Amino acid sequence: MDVPSVIEYAWRLPNVVHAQGQLFSCSTESTKQIMEAIKEHGLNRVIVAACTPRTHEPTFRDSLKEGGLNQYFFEFANIREHCSWVHSKEKEEATDKSKELLRMSLARALLLEPLQEFELPVDKRVLVIGGGISGMTCALSIASQGFDVYLIEKERELGGLARRIYYTIEGKDVQSYLRDLVKRVYSEPRIHVFLGAKILSATGYVGNFLTKIESERGVFEIRHGATVIATGAQEFKPNEYLYGQSDKVLTGLELEELIAKRDERVISAGAVVMIQCVGSRTEERNYCSRVCCSESVKNALKLKEINPNVDIYILFRDMRTYGFKEDYYREASKKGVRFIRYEPQKKPSVKLVKESGKELIRVTVFDPILEKTLEIDADLVSLAVAVIAPESNKEISLLYNAQLGPDDFFKEAHVKLRPVDFSTDGVYLCGIAHYPKHIDEAISQALGAAGRVITLISHDTVIASGSVCIVDEKRCMGCGACSEICTYGAIEIYETKQGKKARMNPVLCKGCGLCNSKCPTGAIQLQHYRDEQLFAQIDAANPEKEILEEVKKVAS
Amino acid sequence: MAGVSRLQYTPEIRIIRVMCSGRVDLAFVFRAFLNKMDGVYIGGCRLDECNYTTHGNYHALTMTLLAKRIMEHIGLYPERLRIEFMNASMGQYFAETVNEMVKKIKELGPVGVGEGMSEEELVRRIKEILRLVPYIKIVKREKLKTKLDKNSPESWNEFFTAEEIENLFKEIPSYYIEPEKCQACMTCARRCPVDAIDSKRGMVHVIDQDKCIKCGTCLDVCPPKFRAVTKLIGVNVPPPPPEEKRLIKREKEKEVA
Amino acid sequence: MSDVEGEAGDFRVTLVKKPRYIREDKCTGCTTCVEYCPVKIPDPFNQEISKNKAVHIYFSQAIPLITYIDENCLYLKEKKCKICEAVCKHEAIDFSAKPEKVEINVGAIILSLGFEPYDPRLRDEYKYGKFKNVVTSMDYERILSSTGPYEGEIRRSSDLRHPHKIAWVQCVGSRQVIEGGNSYCSTVCCTYTQKQVILTKDHDPEAECVVFHNDIRSYGKDFERFFQRAEVLPNVRFIRSYVNILKEDPVTNNITIRYSTPDGGVKDEEFEMVVLSVGLCPPKGASLVAEKFGIELNEHRFCKVDSFVPVTTSKKGIFVSGAFSGPIDIPESVFGSSGAATKCGELLNYRRGKLATQRVYPEERDVRGEEPKVGIFVCY
């Protein structure tokens, strides 16, 4: 591309008082040049024709600030990714296109306005909702870094679902870990525990939340800068396989309790059948509950340990003992646990039978490998039931604008890149409120959430972008087209003497500009991408007209 | 990605950055055609992969489908407008679709010329649409919010029908203040979002039809005891009363006097 | 990393930075040197499927986006050539560069060594490197990429034709207690294979894709739906069977796979390409790192972690994130990393913010009422 001719063209554009080439605009030396040029020539708009704003916009905005100019007076013309690199064989066209891109940028630049990024104070206290392993772990990590945490739990004791888990597949004692964790929570002076708690209301936004709770200790108003949702999940209660009708049919957790207590029924059991995917991977709950395969293997190994003569059958669809847990699956297999696969359209069935005076559960299952139907008489049947999201998630979702996924588990801002954040700033999640997971995974995520919280609250303020929407009340007809599509809840319609009007909460606005294009009257404008700024850029793409002169008129 | 990967594509395209395809206003599309752009390409994130929680790309999609029908209505090839959904790793796709579109547009010829329309006529028609954008947004508001089925793009084309657009333009209303009913209370003028109402004290108010965006606010706010504003469809707006006849004589005032 | 001394709160780490022979402050990434370089080498980033030059940019999104000189450079090997030095307008080539020793003092360490993809050459039965059109999933990942060896077109190396019938073999190197295999499940392969199937169908809607597996492990959030998305695509089959990669046709280089059928029989089927879904192995050099840092490894030679707190290693002040702690997927790596970071925060909290200084900007000029005065800076 012929850069000198682009520079020469730049000089010919209206209002340009300085134009120069730079070998590498983003280098320290070049940004210093920009800063000096701002001072020397009294620049009040800066255009860099270079690469992509995605990587370098912050660098150049910083140069403007260093030069004493509002950073929103900066405009980027991408003549590299949008031009020289993608038209490298058409030198002339690329040069012409660069000039046009520059002209378009200039048109927009003339209409740029100074915007202020506002600094919001950050309340250093944190609310953690849910006193299970995840909530406690998260709270402890935050507190140990010097911040106050309000830990609220709806039950009358801490521990959550882990109170019903006794050991891990690796053989570690969960109850003693849990006891220790609870003790650490209570001995940490910065953690304030509220049991039997219920959230009455919640308002506010990142750095400044206000939550009203009712608990055993009374009604409290809590001010906090960050919110962690660690509300956990619960065990699905099936109404199939005679569950609830026979005390020989249990859930996995119920069996675990019997094993832990060395219940006679377990010690003397001749045969135990475990049925996988009960309530998971169904039409109603189209997800895998992740932990049940390993949990069943874990229970099977423990059963074999205390009662080596027991026959164990695990009826599965796919064994999902992922990672190192595969070794335990193999071990179980070696120890004689029989794994029988079933197809979802040929689910096992159970019925109560009396065999020589003894009541048994007869499990019938079609084995696709042997190609025959098997009948197993079991003393106990354990159902690997789904882990399900509690009904209360919906309420909490509304209180903190924390989105839910299709299965009513909380939905992270980005599956891979922001797995403990919500798209609502200042709200984080961890543990099985996010999705079923093992204890170590929940702890890892709880620490992850603590890390994100600390990132926020270790600063005194949080900076909100200046490129947010504003409402011109005079032009607003109060139709509500804007507020109904803003999923951030940034726009509110309220009554005025002049009828209904939209009101913007700039803190919640994320600057997408959808409301701007929905507004029939142009009353709501996304600053930095206002209608007239974009119109000017569109107009300037037209090489024929004396557009720039017109834009200039508007600008002055 | 097309950029960093240095994928080559045809140089006719000029890219304007917006933070979300949902920011692309119906007016931008026609503003581009007014400026002799021969095509408009909207690039959005993949459906259901919006970076914002607003799913602005679905809104961009319905807006595009509507714009295409309007283009047909005024005699422009709808192929001049295209929307594509992609993520950052789909540079190849971007390059391919841009090439394809530019090729197609070269076949169609320059905007207006390809359609056999005089420049004057083209400008007139587009300006008329631009004037009606607020009205179109109001009338089609609900429909534009629809989240279409991303898995059946073949059905999108029928989302707005030619007949529907026909009706949309047939039913364009005008708002008119009946001089004999207006009591010059200034309510409508104060509430008009675009200052289209001439409202001198004690004078019959008059709507400037060129400025009016047909939002109907005046009709809604005119006090029920006057009911001076009427909505006219399919008839010409009567001319405003001459200046000397705009003075209102109120019975009460006379008595007091 | 050449040396570590000290303890939690005060580690001294010595690093040796290999020379790139390019001056980072001068190179603009223009790639003129690449054009002129006479040495072609198998492109390391593209799994050595395509060629690159001895001087090249590692990959198109590399940071910094500038070149480096590979050890296969003629000058580095035989003191010949130096063409790049002559053509570089920015005087960025620097053959005098030497390895640079850097000493850093840190309070805590996070080990994020990642993983090593399983090398199927370890077992003959995979025929990798023997049959031309048997590739690993890492190879295939590059083949699918627009910056890959075939610029985003799916081609096979034997004749550069587009394969229309592709088989994936799951659990390659995973879930096997045999010499050269790993006993554990690599956790990510089921889902990445489904992704590759979906992308393949995006490229070529007519393609026939067959996945040979033994359990579909869609255990992660939304994985089940993702699997269903792949499963319902036309001409896509998921077959539960171990396979035998039988033979390569000497003319077409197509590959025959033998697998078992639900009725207990076996079937031979020919494919134009076979993708081996390779598992995750501990990173290369894990043992050396463990020794230097004084941490323990587990029986699989991944980092040994606390059984409840999987970011904590056996040594105080040293944490782990990502796949070095075992085969995990991206979301877990990301939150685990954040967790490792917060653990460092707990440890070093007493001196938080001590190294930070406040930036002070000059006062902002009020430009209201000024005519626009524009400065334009054009980058070469």
Image (cartoon, coloured by chain):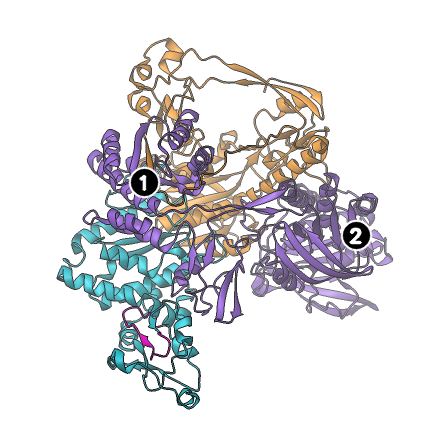
- Where, by quadrant of the figure, is residue B253 drawn? bottom left
Q: Are marks 1 and 2 on the same chain?
A: yes
In the rendered image, residue C196, in percent from the top left (x then y), is placed at: 44, 46
SS category of the residue bearing label 2: strand
Is C293 rendered above or below residue C172? Answer: above
| Magenta run includes residue A140 | no
Residue C372, percent from left and from top: 33, 42
Residue A119 % position (x, y): 57, 45
Q: Which residues are magenta?
A: B200-214
Residue placed at 56% from the left, 36% from the top?
A: C280
Of the residues under marks 1 and 2, which one precedes in the sequence? 1
| Display colour for chain A | purple
Q: Is residue A271 visible?
A: no
Query: Along the line of sight, which residue is nearer the eye, B25 or C85?
Result: B25
In the rendered image, which residue does mark 2 sit on? Answer: A193
Q: Quadrant of residue A231?
A: bottom right
Q: Chain of mark 2?
A: A
The orange-tinted chain is: C
Q: CA distance from mark 1 to mark 2?
A: 55 Å
What x and y, as percent, mark residue B178? 32, 84
Q: Is residue B112 left or right of residue C188?
A: left
Residue A82's label in the rendered image is 1
Please state the chain letter of the residue tagged with numbered disc 1 in the rendered image: A
**Quadrant of the image for the C terminus of chain C?**
top left
Three-letter amino acid code at disc 2?
A: Val
Amino acid at circle 1:
His
At label 1, counting other C-alpha atoms closer than 10 Å, the crowd grade (few under 14, some 14-19, many 20 or more) is: many
Q: Quadrant of the N terminus of chain C?
A: top right
Determine whether, in the image, residue A489 is placed left or right of residue A440: left
Left or right of residue A151, residue C363 in this image: left
The cyan-tinted chain is: B
